[in-house]
Each structure stands twice: as structure tokens, then as C-alpha cells.
Amino acid sequence: MIKKVAIFGQIYSANAEKEITILLKALEKHNVVVFFEKNFYDILKQHNHLSKKFATFTSFNDLNNSFDVFFSIGGDGTILRAVTFIRESNIPIVGINTGRLGFLATIPKENISNAVELLLKKQYVLKERTLLSVSTTPKIESLASLNFALNEVSVSRKNTASMITIKTFLDNEFLNSYWADGLIIATPTGSTGYSLSCGGPIITPQAKSLVLTPIAPHNLNARPLVIPEDTKITFTVSGREEKFFLSLDSRITTISNNTEIAVEKADFNLKMVQFNEETFIKTLRKKLLWGQDTRN
């Protein structure tokens, strides 16, 4: 039985206002206690959207196993931000899509009430998603508390038209020196994002794999590579500039050349709620318009 939930969003829009109203009515109908993320709550109050006061949370430390579900209202980017609140708490997440169809936020706005009913009836499954963790030598303070990513970890050139060289090792065995604009290490979840736009393969969420995808490589024989998820990837970056960008789900940090970066599977997973009518394969077909060509 769902008794307590957290709600998170990033921006206010007329569409989101309607969805929040529907969600709150569905939850209040069953006397579910609601907590809002503080910044999102302030935005809603500023627009006079909420008719009563709600409790709030501000960080990961305010969430614990007393929360049954975490609702993310927005798109896939909102879910990526929501992961920084959930972390290893094991709170299942539900993505309500208020914009275009997403691979993570799959609940359409017209199905919100039905989704709450299915949650209350426990008519869903929990799908675990792999995350990546990052460590550096020497250590970087800005990565101390947010050193994980759900979609991808990437390195890219900074403020220059010249490419960078990424000397890469898999489990301490030399793989390649990529001469490129950058390199992406993506999870199956992230394989439909940045990696896909750079020519990487689509990997189903339950596949225990990672993919290395070079960004605009100079050598055409530098191709995406699928590797086991328990592989430890280490690399160093060099180039004309003294620094480069390290990105964890679009959270960008500036790193000095020759810093050693290690990427490996995180020691916790994200639990995503999946309803029967919203499987990954169905979402894939909708998003990529597979089956829409009348010639097939």
C-alpha cells in the first residue's frame, strides 16, 4: 500500500499545472502523504497553484525508506536530475511525461490517474537500471558527492577546434588512443541518448553491458564498442588545451589534462516502475516510429 510519496519537477508550465492537479487529486483520494521538492514547491506556490501547504524535502538526506514512490514530472532530463535525490535509497521512481515522448518518463499525462490506481493495486514491476560511478586521480572535490550517472559519462574538448587524445584501458589492458572530439561511456539506459546520436547502438535496459562511443573520431576505424558492465574503464586525456570537460548526465566539471579517470558500474541501481502497457520495446517503437512505414 502506498502511504507516502515524493514529487519532483524542474520548471513550471501550464501543461505541468494540469498534470500536478490530476496527480494530487488521485493521491489525496487515497489519503497518500505528499512531499514536494523545495524548489519545485516554491515555483508552484509562486504561481498560486497549490491550495494547501505540503511538506518538502531539499536533498537526498531528507529521503528514506518510508517513501514508497518518487514521482518525476517533466521529461527524461528531469528523471536524470531526480536520480541525484534518490541515489542508493531504493525508492522506486515513476516518470510522468509532460512534454514529448521519453525513454524514461513514459507515463503520458492522460494516464496519470490510472497509473496511481495501478500503483495502489501493485500492478506493476520494478526494473533495475545500472548506474556508473567515477573516480579520479588526483581526487576532485566537486565529484565527491555526485560521482554517479544513469545515462552516460563523457569527456569532450574544451574551448578549441582541435581534437583531444583519450588513452583508454579496459581492466588495465590498453584498448586504444581515441583521437576525437570526445568519448562517451553509456549504460543501456543511456544508449538511447547522447551515445545514439553519435552512432552508438541501442542496448535493452536489462542487458548487462556498457558501450564506448567516440565523438566525431578522426579515424573512421574508431567504432562503438560494447563491453561487459563489470569492466573497469580508465583513461587519461591530453590535447592542446590544458583542460577538458567531464560530464556525468550533463553535470559538467572541468578537468586538467593527464588526470586519470576511472569509470565502473556503481554499487547501487535505480528502481524504475514499469506498467504492462509501457514496456521499453513499445516505447522504442513509438519513439523511433518503427512499424510506421507502410511498405514494411
Image (spheres, rainbow, N blue to C red):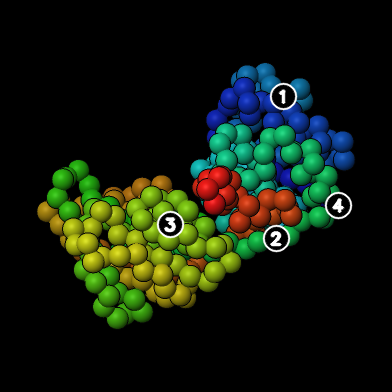
Q: Secondary structure at mark 4?
A: loop
Which amino acid does the dot numbered 2 rest on? Answer: Leu
Question: Answer yes or no: do the residues labelled 1 and 2 have beta carbons within 8 Å?
Answer: no
Q: Amino acid at mark 4?
A: Lys
Q: How many marks?
A: 4
Instruction: Identify the residue position indicated by label 2 in the image.
Output: 126
Q: Earlier in the sequence, mark 3 or mark 1?
A: 1
**Which residue sits at x=57%, y=56%?**
87
Amino acid bearing label 1: Leu
Q: Nearer the viewer, mark 1 or mark 2?
A: 2
Rendering coords of residue 129 (x, y %): 58, 61
Q: Going from the N terminus, do you reach mark 1 or mark 4 first?
A: 1
Report how far apart the C-alphas of labels 4 and 3 lie in the structure.
34 Å
Mark-to-mark CA distance, 2 and 3: 22 Å
The outermost residue toward the top is: 48
Characterize the local packing of mark 1: few (<14), some (14-19) or many (20 or more) Cα atoms within 10 angstroms: some
Q: Which mark is residue 98?
A: none
Q: Quadrant of residue 49?
A: top right
Of the residues tagged 3 and 1, which is closer to the observer? 3
Cα gap from disc 2 to disc 4, whole angstroms: 14 Å
